[in-house]
Amino acid sequence: MSDRPPFLEAEVVKKFLTYTALIPLLKTALINFSAGTGAVVQPVRTIVPVANYGGFLGVMPAYSATDDALATKVVTFYENKRAADENEISAFPSHHSTVLLFEPRNGSLKAIIDGNVITDRRTAAVSAIATKLLKPASADVLCILGSGAQAHSHFEVFMELFSFKEVKMWSRRRESAELFASTMKANVQVCATAREAVADADVIITVTMATEPILLGEWVKPGAHVNAVGACRPDWRELDDSLMQHCVLYVDSREAALKESGDIILSGAEIFAELGQVLKETKPALAEKTTVFKSVGLAIEDTVSAKLVFDLWSATKTPE
Ligand SMILES: NC(=O)C1=CN([C@@H]2O[C@H](COP(=O)(O)OP(=O)(O)OC[C@H]3O[C@@H](n4cnc5c(N)ncnc54)[C@H](O)[C@@H]3O)[C@@H](O)[C@H]2O)C=CC1
Ligand SMILES: O=C([O-])C1=[NH+]CCC1
């Protein structure tokens, strides 16, 4: 291999970052993160608003001693207000990310890795982990609100791991939900309103760029489980106060959620546990209650994903 760090593009990440390989790694990373023993070192990400353009730049470093993995993701996400005009279809993605993977022993740069597939898959995999623990015992109906990149990765892993009888989707732009449904192998029912999509759902996933609530507590079936993935800014919402205040609330990181999640900060909802605590069984999974898993996204998830991709890719290379 040359001294220049390789760039691993999205196709390489897609090939090696399977959910089967990723999920056990994420579970361990979340347990180590929540244990607070120092096995995972990860500050809350730094965010630089790009105010003139409705954008944000996030820097997300983490180190896992257990995985011997050191990396930082750099991610940009843009509100794309122009697309909020229903007639405007923007083909430009709202999120872009890159992961820099380092050699922990000496700090050298090992690889530059496309971060988009990592972000999509690790986020969906963490929602799937939460859902396994928190969904009601009988879960037949899945509802997805939003039809972008995260909707695709969530659908992908949820179809792989669960056997829902029905999948319902609502998206702000109906054409986009219809396009989603037509490209998927499973039957997806496109609904005219979020309320219609949510009715009777046992598991709900919110994956939108909404800044105001799109999911109201009064629509949610008692005992359902919600994965709230969007609204990662302190003044953005996806869920209303009623849902936030009447659920049992789980988060990926208590510290990050209290800094970044508008749904938590503005509703004053109380956090019950971190997902890593439930995985370690130091806090219970109250699956019979209405539960919300509020995910903001953690650098440690990107770090262990990047290390996995790099190791599997390296193993296919013959030394010069
Ligand atoms: N928790 C986590 O770890 C992560 C969270 N995210 C968040 O997940 C959300 C979805 O991300 P992507 O799928 O990558 O974005 P995307 O841009 O691919 O899709 C966004 C979806 O939201 C819809 N949308 C946009 N504005 C809306 C509004 N005002 N009301 C209702 N729907 C609206 C769009 O039509 C589209 O269906 C974003 O909020 C993103 O920041 C993204 C990555 C990781
Ligand atoms: O974890 C992540 O990469 C992100 N969370 C919200 C926007 C991007």
Image (tube, helix red, strand yellow):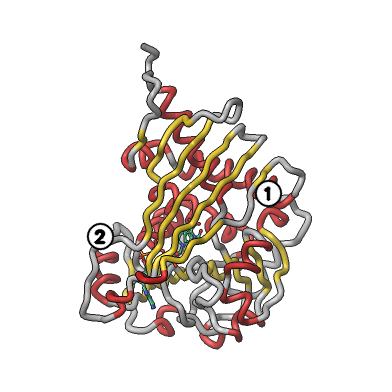
Q: What is the x, y in percent for residue 253?
A: 65, 59
Tell me the amino acid under the disc marked 1.
Answer: Phe
Q: Which residue is mark 2?
A: 183
| Viewer-side residue, 6 vs 294 | 6
Q: Where residue 58 sits: x, y (%)?
A: 49, 57
Residue at disc 2, secondary structure:
helix
Nearer to us in this view, 177 or 109: 109
Residue 312's place in the image compared with 250, above or below, is above
Gap in angstroms between the C-alphas marked 1 and 2: 37 Å
Question: Above or below — where is 319 with respect to 164?
Answer: above
Q: Quadrant of ligand 1?
A: bottom left
Mark 2 nearby-residue class (10 Å; few <14, some 14–19, many ≥20): few
Q: Earlier in the sequence, mark 1 or mark 2?
A: 1
- Depth check, mark 1 against mark 2: the one in front is 1
- Please tell me which residue is depicted at 62% across the width and 40% down the height of the picture: 63
Q: Is residue 141 visible?
A: no
Q: Amino acid at mark 2?
A: Thr
- Nearest the viewer among 46 and 117 is 46
The image shows residue 18 at horizontal and vertical percentages of: 44, 41
Res 309 quadrant in image? top left
Residue marked by disc 1:
33
Residue 185 as seen in the image, left or right of residue 250: left
Numbered tag placed on residue 68 in the rendering: none
